[in-house]
Image (tube, rainbow, N blue to C red):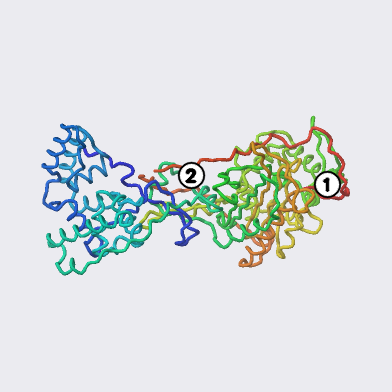
């Protein structure tokens, strides 16, 4: 029976693009190959050159070379190497089906397959598959990759001299590369032209006028997993596997085209905003940021780190950090769902003891009765713990999951009511996704980095689901938005965002001992989340060392400044719109089942370089076991 083709025979380069453009972000490849249909080429130079050089009787023979087989057998008997396959069909069998054959059994199998395939497969298909499979040197598999590697052009545009040169070096491409051995390469080139003329494939005058082609310099192997782009490619691979359904083994051989959601202009804006941080930063400081289009869930910009070659962990998708007070709105929304009103009064005095742990407000402040808007605006810990005690941690947890958190989020399974202070540790993009659900009026659109995937011919294999599903009632989101908008007003913990000069809602977040600092804010069209945390050499979570003149790194300091610096530029092309409310128009969205028209790839690959950084270790709780010490700051200081 004719076996399945070897996996690497089909392997093609998978290309990743910036947004819906032809600007390449990077490639995934086990084999540098792009399969083309050589039968459609306007000229037959490359086909004729290969036939003349490798198998002059190709179109007439039975697929095998009896003399070659006898010679291989005789050499084997005498203990000598069994030489390579003689006919194109035998070479095709070896490259496409069986791999390198040695010994009697292998050669016999190759011979039988060549005879069988010669009867069942057209000569044109055999030649086409051969040209797409053979190795041409310079890491190029197939004629398309070879044309690009040697001449910087498509295979369909190869002229006579270029075709003759490539055909001539097939037996030993690395040794006969014109830049390695120009004399041998020219000798082989002339040989092919002579054979083509002798077989009436070209005219004598064409042979006489041909000049040896000039090849380009060999390009070093590209390393796309570097700089900030390496983190984007890591995220693409992660989404291909976890959300879409490709296997790691398929990605590098599929030959697909992946169009990301990343906006190159906004990506640079985000990188510039983070790059503007003071040069003297603590060792081990990490910054994560993601910006999401609320209309689709598309990630417009993402910062997973400064250099993938140095730290091979994406701060947005792989690391986690305690959410801090960015978690509080989940409790507020849960309360609104249970019928509570923003005008309700809560006790904001502190500190307070919960079981064996003490909970205090930022700066040691103690408040009297406060309504839910003020409790949110000033991020009053004790008021929110009392609110969570009334509605139950389970309700708060379910809101977080419905909004965008994974049910497996580190620390989210803890049942203590102090979990409302953000002791759970989500990924940065999950914070952005959850707040996108707020910005849309309660419609969840999963954050994603892949917009669509096509095959090499442009047929769509996958498109991201962007319609979304309604998770919360509009009336409740409308009330929640009022509280989050108050955070950005003068005196609020997120007043920095209020400097954007348009309607905005936000929330700050800082964990106990300043082990993380979070800021997330949005305008109706876009949500951006910024996370900051510090990692020890052993991967342990550390308190963020103050820097840049800031006494304490909280969500309202550097994360908020990064957010504002980015958003000022990022929203310039967006019309100013009011935040969602039931007064400015409802957004009715009917849920629908998720559809992923993914077609299984026929071909596979290794993952990115192995992680060289220790994963961040996050403790299960950030609540102090001792009463919080009074701060030197005024008692009116807002909580983070």
Horizontal side, residue 86 vs residue 271: left or right: left
Above or below, 218 against 112 in this view is below
Q: Dot 1 corresponds to which residue? A: 345
What crowding class fits label 2: few (fewer than 14 Cα within 10 Å), some (14-19), or many (20 or more)?
some
Camera-nearest residue between 157 and 591: 157
The answer to whether one can see residue 54 in this image is: yes
Left or right: residue 162 compared with residue 616: left
Left or right of 578 on screen, residue 349: right
Between residues 612 and 560, which one lies in front from this camera angle?
Answer: 612
Is residue 424 rendered to the left or right of residue 155? Answer: right
C-alpha distance separating marks 1 and 2: 53 Å
Query: x%, y% of residue 292?
Result: 59, 55
Q: Which mark is residue 608?
A: 2
Q: Residue at x 35, y 45 (%)?
A: 602
| Residue 288 image point, x, y percent | 63, 49
Q: Secondary structure at mark 2?
A: loop
What is the x, y in percent for residue 427? Answer: 62, 44
Mark 1 neighbour class, 10 Å CA radius: few under 14, some 14 to 19, many 20 or more: some
Res 337 visible: no
The answer to which image quadrant residue 627 occupies is top right
Q: Residue furthest top?
A: 356
Eyeballing the image, is 296 above or below 111? below
Q: Is residue 203 above or below residue 293?
A: below
């Amino acid at each position: 029976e004719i076996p399945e083709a070897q996996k690497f025979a089909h392997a093609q380069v998978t290309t990743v693009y910036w947004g819906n453009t032809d600007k390449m972000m990077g490639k995934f490849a086990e084999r540098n190959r792009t399969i083309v249909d050589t039968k459609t080429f306007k000229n037959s130079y490359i086909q004729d050159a290969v036939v003349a050089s490798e198998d002059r009787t190709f179109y007439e023979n039975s697929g095998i070379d009896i003399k070659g087989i006898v010679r291989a057998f005789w050499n084997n008997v005498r203990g000598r190497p069994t030489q390579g396959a003689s006919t194109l069909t035998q070479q095709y069998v070896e490259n496409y089906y069986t791999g390198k054959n040695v010994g009697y059994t292998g050669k016999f199998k190759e011979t039988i397959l060549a005879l069988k395939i010669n009867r069942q497969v057209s000569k044109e298909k055999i030649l086409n598959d051969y040209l797409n499979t053979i190795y041409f040197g310079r890491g190029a598999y197939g004629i398309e990759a070879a044309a690009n590697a040697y001449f910087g052009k498509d295979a369909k545009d190869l002229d006579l001299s270029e075709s003759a040169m490539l055909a001539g070096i097939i037996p030993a491409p690395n040794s006969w590369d014109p830049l390695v051995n120009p004399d041998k390469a020219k000798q082989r080139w002339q040989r092919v032209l002579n054979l083509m003329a002798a077989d009436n494939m070209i005219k004598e005058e064409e042979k006489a006028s041909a000049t040896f082609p000039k090849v380009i310099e060999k390009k070093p192997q590209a390393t796309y997993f570097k700089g900030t782009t390496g983190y984007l490619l890591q995220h693409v691979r992660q989404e291909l596997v976890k959300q879409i359904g490709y296997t790691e083994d398929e990605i590098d051989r599929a030959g697909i085209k992946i169009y990301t959601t990343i906006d190159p202009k906004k990506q640079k804006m985000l990188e510039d905003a983070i790059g503007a941080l003071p040069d003297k930063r603590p060792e081990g400081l990490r910054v994560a940021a993601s910006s999401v289009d609320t209309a689709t869930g598309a990630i417009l910009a993402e910062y997973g780190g400064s250099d993938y070659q140095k730290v091979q962990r994406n701060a947005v998708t792989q690391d986690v950090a305690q959410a801090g007070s960015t978690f509080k709105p989940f409790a507020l929304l849960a309360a609104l769902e249970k019928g509570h009103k923003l005008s309700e009064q809560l006790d904001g005095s502190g500190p307070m003891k919960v079981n064996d742990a003490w909970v205090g407000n930022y700066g040691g402040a103690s408040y009297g009765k406060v309504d839910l808007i003020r409790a949110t605006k000033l991020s009053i810990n004790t008021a929110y713990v009392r609110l969570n005690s009334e509605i139950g941690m389970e309700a708060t947890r379910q809101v977080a999951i419905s909004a965008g958190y994974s049910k497996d989020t580190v620390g989210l399974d803890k049942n203590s009511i102090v979990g409302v202070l953000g002791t759970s540790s989500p990924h940065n993009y999950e914070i952005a996704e959850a707040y996108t659900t707020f910005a849309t009026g309660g419609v969840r659109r999963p954050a994603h980095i892949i917009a669509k995937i096509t095959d090499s011919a442009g047929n769509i294999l996958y498109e991201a689901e962007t319609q979304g599903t309604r998770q919360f009632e509009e009336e409740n989101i409308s009330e929640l938005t009022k509280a989050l908008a108050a955070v950005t007003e003068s005196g609020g913990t997120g007043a920095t965002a209020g400097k954007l000069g348009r309607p905005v809602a936000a929330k700050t977040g800082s964990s106990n001992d300043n082990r993380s600092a979070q800021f997330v804010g949005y305008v109706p069209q876009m949500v951006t989340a910024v996370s900051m945390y510090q990692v020890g050499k052993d991967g342990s979570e550390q308190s963020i060392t103050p820097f840049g003149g800031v006494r304490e790194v909280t969500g309202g300091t550097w994360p908020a400044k990064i957010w504002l610096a980015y958003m000022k530029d990022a929203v310039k092309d967006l019309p100013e719109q009011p935040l969602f409310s039931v007064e400015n128009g409802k957004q009715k969205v009917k849920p629908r089942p998720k559809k992923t028209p993914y077609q299984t790839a026929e071909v596979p690959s290794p993952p990115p370089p192995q992680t060289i950084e220790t994963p961040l270790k996050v403790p299960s709780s950030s609540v102090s076991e001792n009463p919080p010490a009074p701060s030197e700051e005024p008692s009116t200081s807002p909580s983070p």
